[in-house]
Amino acid sequence: MLLLTRTNLGALQKKLEELELDEQQRKRLEAFLTQKQKVGELKDDDCEKICELGAGNGGVVFKVSHRPSGLIMARKLIHLEIKPAIRNQIIRELQVLHECNSPYIVGFYGAFYSDGEISICMEHMDGGSLDQSLKKAGKIPEQILGKVSIAVIKGLSYLREKHKIMHRDVKPSNILVNSRGEIKLCDFGVSGQLIDSMANSFVGTRSYMSPERLQGTHYSVQSDIWSMGLSLVEMAIGRFPIPPPDSMELEQIFGFPVEGDAGCSQSSPKPCPPGRPSSSYGPDSRPPMAIFELLDYIVNEPPPKLPGIFGAEFQDFVNKCGPCFNGTHNSPQVHSFIKQSEAEEVDFAGWLCSTIGLSQPVTPTHGTM
């Protein structure tokens, strides 16, 4: 395992100077790197389990206390029956995460193998993931999703521009938040060998895959943007949006008739996606959709849109998360919805803490990113 020495710390701090950070972001990243120096070599016996945080993507995540350093971490355990050479390759590939230091990427402490399981130790985000917030909130307000969009775009841009990494698994459960108002990406595809080894456990994730990825064509950052757009619609309306809700269901969701429903289905309800209970987030009472029906829908039908209740800029942004964002002059970063969201003062930390019942720190990060 790669240990963070004074020399490495200095090099990583120097790399922070290349990023466009405000003073608060810089101080927090430097504080994280300084804390990380205390960790040393990670071992199974040094991690005291506190509670389970969640499960998915072939693994279980626990909140743990790292005894030697006193740090609270999130430890993801992935059970894999693989040869030692493959296991060692995965651990080596995961070391790239030590170089990934951004306000929009979950911090990485290290990875190791023990008793048939790969352990990935990460920064603990006390607000959990946005799919958990969605279950509590029912729907997430447009202004909040504006701040989420900014963070996801900046996180994806950082991974692509600084490390040539595509995320490959953008969805609400891989967007983590905390009581300071930070929004960060996790579980991105840094290890090709780990992706291959876990291929059989990714069935549920396919519901967020872009058409080109499902068809096996060239994977690009546009596939991540497509998944972000799908996730935004889900969080805005409170349920997975494939197939789209009809006008009757939209009225159930919002409590009043919704006009100009942006291409949402008017026909009899199609089945809901596999693995989605009828009580998912909103009043989705459709029978389960077979996995092949869902994949066929993603490949052959138009991507979901927002109903007309949302702002025109937000609707246009989501629409362009389909095949429309390409090239620097037509990128998500310069869309008017993002510019508008950057200018708005939004207390993301306050919204999160009131939604999920967290105590808010004295100096949270407000929505100015």
Image (cartoon, rainbow, N blue to C red):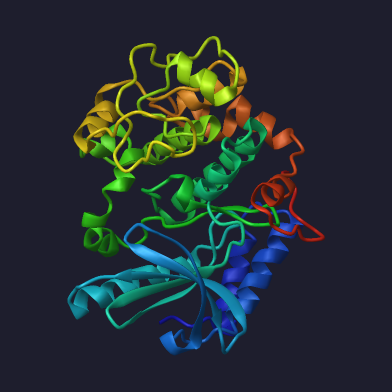
Asked whether, in this view, residue 10 is left or right of residue 40, the answer is right
Q: Relative to the observer, which residue lies in front, 227 or 161?
A: 227
Residue 201 horizontal/vertical position (percent):
26, 56
Q: Position of residue 86 (x, y in %)?
A: 21, 73
Determine whether 177 is above or below 64 in the image: above
* The image quarter in which residue 338 lies: top right
Asked whether, in this view, residue 154 is left or right of residue 120, the answer is: right
- Residue positioned 27% across, 79% down in the render: 116
> Would residue 106 appear left or right of 181 to someone viewing this image?
left
The x and y percentages for residue 127 are 61, 56
Q: Quadrant of the N terminus?
A: bottom left
Residue sitting at 52 percent across and 29 percent down? 237
Q: Give above or below for 175 relative to 341.
A: below
**Foreground of the two, 15 or 81:** 81
Placement of the C terminus among the 4 image quadrants: top right
How many numbered discs? 0
Residue located 43% across and 33% down the image: 230
Q: Residue furthest left?
A: 83
**In this picture, residue 16 sits left or right of residue 251:** right
Q: Residue 300, percent across and down?
A: 25, 23
The quadrant holding residue 272 is top left
Residue 190, quarter of the rendered image: bottom left
Can residue 316 be seen by looking at this rendering?
no
Question: Above or below — where is 57 with respect to 354?
Answer: below
Q: Is residue 14 visible?
A: yes
